[in-house]
Image (tube, rainbow, N blue to C red):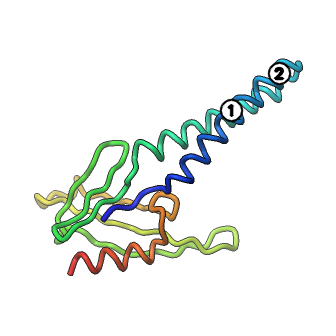
Amino acid sequence: MTWGPRRAVIAATGVLAIAGAVGATLYGREGDRIGALLLWLVALLFVALTAYASLLNPRLFANQYGVAVRTLKGTREVDWQYVEVRVKTTRRLGRDTRTLELELASQDGGAADSELVVLGQFELGAEPDDVLEDLNRLRG
């Protein structure tokens, strides 16, 4: 099974990047250089978000043997016996946010290679609780 950002969300961020670039160009032609600069920054932000979501999609792979998590440093594969999975609820600005936490221990026993990966609904493309249920089923 795999989880990653939804294609529709990735496409929407790409469209927003294009819209920001077009808006910046039009504002620049009208003489509003500060407005154009701000729109270029917004466009660059959406380009970065689109690239991030596209390159790291899917973020999480799982089968009966273990999990693999794709990050900017590369893909890390870990057997189930070295994985702890939980859903954590955090309250920020009066709103509860649920994230899936994967604690990936080192397979050779060294603490230096341990890693905590925190994935939210955007990165998973699904509710963290649903992903946890699927992972527990795969784990057996």
Q: The C terminus is located in which quarter?
A: bottom left
Q: Residue at x 43, y 75 (%)?
A: 87
Query: Which of the labelled discs sits on residue 90, or is there none?
Result: none
Horizontal side of 26 relative to 58 (left or right) equals right
Amino acid on which disc 1 is placed: Leu
Q: Nearer the viewer, residue 94 or 70?
A: 70
Residue placed under numbered mark 2 in the picture: 33
Q: Position of residue 38 (x, y in %)?
A: 76, 32
Q: Where 77 sits versus 44, above or below? A: below
Q: Where 37 sits versus 66, above or below? A: above
Q: The N terminus is located in which quarter?
A: bottom left
Q: Nearer the viewer, residue 85 or 32?
A: 32
Q: Position of residue 22 (x, y in %)?
A: 73, 29
Q: Which of the two discs, 2 and 1, labels the residue nearer the N terminus?
A: 2
Around disc 1, counting alpha carbons within 10 Å, would you say few (fewer than 14), some (14 to 19), or many (20 or more)?
Answer: some
Quadrant in the picture for residue 130:
bottom left
Q: Residue at x 76, y 23 (%)?
A: 25
Q: Nearer the viewer, residue 140 or 103?
A: 140
Q: Residue at x 50, y 52 (%)?
A: 7
SS under mark 1: helix
Q: Nearer the viewer, residue 10 or 103?
A: 10
Around disc 2, counting alpha carbons within 10 Å, would you say few (fewer than 14), some (14 to 19), or many (20 or more)?
Answer: some
Query: Which of the labelled discs sits on residue 41, or is there none?
Result: 1
Q: Residue at x 50, y 56 (%)?
A: 6
Horizontal side of 55 relative to 25 (left or right) equals left
Q: Position of residue 127 (x, y in %)?
A: 49, 72
Residue positioned most to the left: 108
Q: Where 112 sits versus 128, above or below? A: above
Q: Position of residue 62 (x, y in %)?
A: 26, 65
Q: Where 13 sits versus 107, above or below? A: above
Amino acid on which disc 2 is placed: Arg
